[in-house]
Image (cartoon, grey):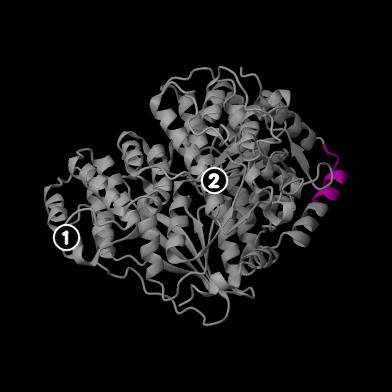
Amino acid sequence: MDAHTPQDGTDPFVAARQSFWAPETAPPIPSGPGTLASFLRAEYLPGTHEHPPRFLTDPLDERTVSLRRDVRLRRALAPEELLAAALSGDHRLRSTVAEAWPLSLSQHDTERVRHELRGEILRCTDPGTLAHLIDLATAGGLHVLEPLQWAELARTLPLDTRPARLALWRHLACHPNLLEMLPPPDKASDAYERLLLAAAAGRRLFESPAFPKHDGLLVVQSMLLGEMDSPGEGSSGGLGVLLGGLGDALARTQGIDAVITLVTKDAREVGEEPDLLRVRGAGHWTLTLPTDPHEKATAGDLAGTALTWWTNKVLEDLDRRPDLVHVRYADDRSLAVAEAARRAGARLVFTATPDPHRRVSERHASRTATGKTGPGTEELRQDLHRVFAADRLVDRADEVIGIPGRGGTGELIRYFPQLAALRGGEGPSAPQEGITAYQPANDETIRQRRLLDSLFAAELPSTLDPTARDLPLLLTVGRLHPLKQQDVLVQAWIESGLHFRSTLVVVGGSARAEGRDPTEQEVRSAIADLLHEHPDAAGRLALVPAMPNNAVRCLERALAGSQTTGRAHYVCPSAKEEFGIAVLEAMDAGLPVAGTGRGGIPHYLQDAVNGILLDTSSPKHLADGLQRLLNLDTAVTNVMTRRARATVRARYSIDAAALAFASVYTGLPETRVAAHRT
């Protein structure tokens, strides 16, 4: 193990980042033979070392972390260096090249850059690399080839060079004198290329709404993972629920004229005659960015580059430019939307969270292999790339905000020391999030009864044995993902013997096997293995596919007020939760709640006051918390649930959240915002 680990009180990842941004007060970067220590020394050596020593054995790793360090230090590398990296890199290095590219162009002779890029494009034979080179030309607005050369390239590209072909269409679309080289959409090989060619040729894929002509802002927020209306399925989660309600509430808040929520959808699902813009609520629309179904299979193609192009296209088709764009997830997709915001002249707001920051040392400090292979090293590379994406979004943003947590934003500053000076040393603001008030249906009583009965429908697979109806019930809701730890919950419940005295309902995941991604299947397989080893638990566990948010909230109310089942409790077993929309909804429904103590939940859940805080770091610790929850005296539980509901209704309404966010948005300097209105 490295010399320092989180267990001995010194987090090596935190120490490295503090040494980079505040070297005069920070502890030294940890030394040691481990993989993490080597990566940290290479990436976070303080800026005084212009030519740092080599710490990593793999040349690609060394080049990647060195370039990330240069970008953080705002060093303008020569275009030849960046092109060399682009030619030899994986998607993470190429993403970093894309971040370094604008500064390089601003500091070096444009003709020299064009000459170098032209030569590499004409020599390149790898489709993924060629796509990246063309995208660099597009990003820089560079005329690197003559029209006849582009025409020849378009003519000679075979169909199997898909990444380069799509990059070429995007590039030609940016130059009016090259548009005639685009093939007609009916010559496309699939739905995605057909949409791209239609948009590239200038066809509008939707009719712009008639936005209000007031003095408020047009706000764009991004929801780039999963579906807004399918929480718990695939990568869809609480963020979609939050943004759906928040967008509706913002649109009726003073200072905000309208809200657009950007979503993504596989082009095959968009349809032959797409209408990418849909009304969500009064003054709130969703706007779809088509995604390439082949994207994941093409390691050399940067999803972010195409997404920037699409975001620019759809924003250009609006009758009014956005004043502000808000992104909330640290990855290449958010970087793509941030770049589109810059090109549109919109302000950028970024919600920073210490994810994956808080788990970097915990996950990787004990790794010793520094070679290229191995899943552990690959996970470390991906975690550090996401950390870099977060740093870039912080650097790009006009306003950085946090999510409220115990102790304010202190944890956020611990992992983002560059934020410590904001607001006169107070750090970033953290506007409250919230939940939409539940609206009972006209047939609410019937719906509640049907949902309750469905948990005990013996003829269906993975439901509860009707003979266990009187037992206490544990409920958890969320997408099936290792971070959500539903498998750890099942393990804790079984190994502690709680399956003999309670039932467990897990809501989440796709109902169709073909719709399950690898992470969901990993959790399902772990649960299946546990049930195989403990068949006596099968009738006490129900695995229920993801349901719409209003159905989940209806079920929670049915369980909270049921006279025909044992007392129900809500459990959040996640390794961490930044906020926990589902926890607030369960508190509002009147369920006794137990949630992870890691992340933002302790900001509103006080242990033994309005709920129970859980240690979810191991099945044993989680089981101890479950035992404590189920052993609570009825009178104590009743007091806790009343306090929990009062907490939500007093502090976490969606309208209060909208006011808090509107205050942030409208507080940005008016001169910059107003200048972008059309």
* Left or right placement of residue 135 versus residue 650 in this view: left
Residue 45 location (% of width, % of height): 56, 31
Q: What mark, if any, has residue 390 been given in the picture?
A: 2
Looking at the rendered image, the quarter that the C terminus falls into is bottom left
Report the predominant secondary structure element of the magenta stretch. Answer: helix
Q: x and y percent of residue 483 in the render?
A: 57, 37
Q: Of the residues shown, which amino acid type is indicated by label 1? A: Pro
Q: Answer few, some or many: residues within 10 Å of disc 2's Cα (few below 14, many 20 plus, some between 14 and 19).
A: many
528 and 358: which one is in front? 358
> In this figure, which residue is indicated by the disc labeled 1?
183
Report crowding for label 1: few under 14, some 14 to 19, many 20 or more residues within 10 A (C-alpha): some
Magenta span: 632-641
Tally of numbered discs? 2
**Residue 678 magenta-highlighted:** no
* Residue 2 seen in this snapshot: yes
Judging from the image, what secondary structure is the residue with disc 2 in? helix
Q: Position of residue 119 (x, y in %)?
A: 21, 44
Q: Residue at x 88, y 45 (%)?
A: 635
Q: Quick one: label 1 or label 2, which is nearer the N terminus?
A: 1
The residue at the point 46 percent across, 51 percent down is 335
Spatial CA distance of label 1 from label 2 is 38 Å
634 in magenta? yes
Which one is in front, 62 or 605?
62
Q: Which element is circle 1 on?
A: loop
**Which residue is at 63% across, 24% downward?**
30
